[in-house]
Each structure stands twice: as structure tokens, then as C-alpha cells.
Amino acid sequence: MIQDLQKHNFSYSSFILIGFPGFLEKRQLLFIPFCLLFILAISSNSVIIHTIRTGNTLQSPMYILICTIAAVDLSIPMTFAPKMLLAFLFDWNEISLIGCLVQMFFVHLTSSFQSTVTLIMAVDRYVAICNPLHYNNYINYSTLVKMSIAALIRNGIFIIIFTIPAGYLTFCTSNVIEHCYCDHMSLVSLACEDTLKNNIMGLAAIFFVAGVDLIFIFFSYLKIFHVAHRTASGKAREKAIHTCSTHLIVILMGYLLALCSFLAYRIRNSVSTDTHILVSVLYLILPSCFNPIIYGVRTKEIREQILQKMKGGKKCSVSNIG
């Protein structure tokens, strides 16, 4: 009876983010490695974006897509890392319900768009290798803009569908979120009412965004491998397969980390809280650190532009000193 009255008359409107509860007394030490990862993600993606935007020869659809994924990788850490780092350093752990929902929306939106951009890149490679004569007809700036807007609308709708209902739940049991940032399940798990509908909406969003993207990515690269093996010459085939294999491995590793984070909510007794939080943070920030290398620096034209700018900067500095 008392619990029923509490449920209907009280609900927390602010929450405490406790990331890595097993390291509460040493949380300031966590600031160092995660700050380094944050700086690496921001600086490396900024370099890629600047190089492509200022490079006159880097204006084809492929480079625009690399610039887009760098912009997404730049945005993802910004949605949660500053708040997380301040919490580690100064114990600024409190967040309002509205702030939690806003952070949840942008964390899921940017991370889902990362998945969608990799799908568009897979389509770009598919057309370039499997239908090269019509590449310019199918893949151009207008097409990329239309695909990006359509993906943004799709992802936004599915994320809104599970974000808004989460704000109407009653939170009367606890206001401590054992996580470094607000995600859907970490907030919903604190509700003191039935959350079956919320879980179903979250699962539907995962399938219709990340799941559908992964299916089409896998199909595109499967077709690429088949065509490259059947029609390309030895050297061209080796280059195409090597490039696409690297991209596919990186994509699958990102999905694997995301899947581990997702399953950790369903097998709580088998995975420690700190391990779950670590996987959840790494699946967001690690791709932002390594994608600039995989998609940017490993691309010959981008690498040459970066080296040219570095050499030019050194020459300028020498001449200024003289």
C-alpha cells in the first residue's frame, strides 16, 4: 500500500550518474585514459575534415562520405564525454530528467547515424566496383544529400519513439544510474512500473536502424567480393578485396561492441557493472578514434594531403624564423 502511494505521488526528476562504481575512490585516475581517447577522437577527425574541405582534389563522393563519417565521429564523443570527464574529475554527477533525455536522444542519434553513413559508404563502393560505368549517374552530391536526409529522418523518428515515452515513466525506487551517460536501458531499468512497451520500442529501433543497416552492408560487401573476384585483374582484385575487408572488419567490430553492450542488460548476473560500462563507452568512442586512420590516413590521396600540409607548415615556420 505504501509503495503504491509512493509510486503515484513521487517520481525522481534528477539522477546521479555513477560510472564505474567499483572505482569510486579512484575515479580521478579514469580521467586520464578517457581524456586521451577524447582528445585523439576530436583532433584526428578535425584533421580529416579540414584536409578534405581544403583539398581541391578531394571533392568526389567518396571523400565527401569520409568527411561525413569524420563529422559524425567528431560529434559522438561530444554528446557524452565532456559530462563524463567532469564527473570523473570533479564528481559533477547530477543530471536532470530533461537533460538525461536530451543526452539519450543525441547519443543514440549520432551513433545510429554512424551506422547509416557506413551503409552509404558500402553502397558507394558497391556501385563503384559492380557498376562503374553508371557511377556518376547514381552517386553524386545530390544523391548523398537525399540519402543522408532520409536516414536522419528515419533514425530520428525511431529514437524519438523510445526516448519520449521514457520521460513519462515513474522513477520512485532509485535515482542512481550506474553508467557514465544516459542511454535508454540504463534509465528505463530504474522505473518502478511495467516497462515492456519501452523494451519493445527499444528493440524495434535497434532492428529497424542498426539491424537493417547491417543487413544491407553485409549484402553490399558480399556482392563486391563476388564481382571483384570474378572480373577484376589480379592487382585490382587484391586492392579492392583488401580495402573492403578492412572496412568490413572495422564495421563488424563496432557492431560487436554494441551487441555486447546490448546483451549485458539482459545477462546482468554474468557481466560486472564496470565491464558493462567499459564496453558501452568503448563502443562509442573507439570507432571515433580509429575511423580516421581506417578511412582517412590509409587513403593515399588524403595521406598525401596531410603530409603536404605538414611539410608546408614546417617550411612556413622556418621562413618566419629566418
Image: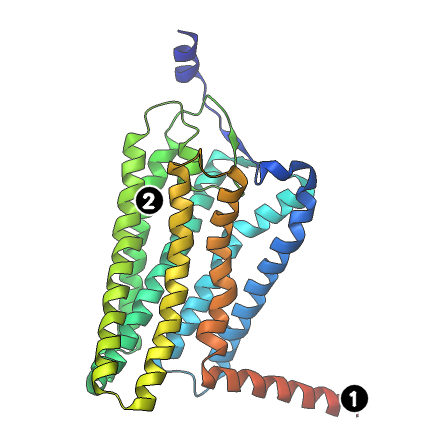
Q: Kindly identify which numbered label has been placed on residue 321.
A: 1
Q: Tag 2, which secondary structure?
A: helix
* Residue denoted by label 2: 160
Q: Residues within 10 Å of mark 2 (few under 14, many from 20)?
A: some
Using residue 321 as the reference point, say whether residue 268 is left or right of it.
Answer: left
The number of numbered discs placed on residues in the rendered structure image is: 2
Residue 228 showing in the rendered view? yes
Q: Classify the position of the C terminus by image quarter.
A: bottom right
Which residue, as the protein is rendered here, is positioned at the far top?
Answer: 1
Q: Quadrant of residue 127?
A: bottom left
Residue at horizontal 21 percent and vertical 80 percent from the top: 227
Residue at horizontal 62 percent and vertical 42 percent from the top: 87
> How far from the left and from the top, in percent, is residue 39?
61, 62
| Relative height, residue 116 to residue 159 (above, below) | below
Residue 93 showing in the rendered view? no
Using residue 108 as the reference point, say whether residue 34 is left or right of it.
Answer: right
| Relative height, residue 64 to residue 207 (above, below) | below
| Amino acid carrying mark 1 in the image | Ile
Task: Name the N-terminal-most of marks 1 and 2.
Answer: 2
Q: Nearer the viewer, residue 69 or 254?
A: 254
Q: Tag 1, which secondary structure?
A: helix
> How far from the left and from the top, in percent, is residue 309?
59, 85
> How far from the left and from the top, in percent, is residue 67?
43, 72
Q: Quadrant of residue 125?
A: bottom left
| Amino acid carrying mark 2 in the image | Ile
The CA span between labels 1 and 2 is: 55 Å
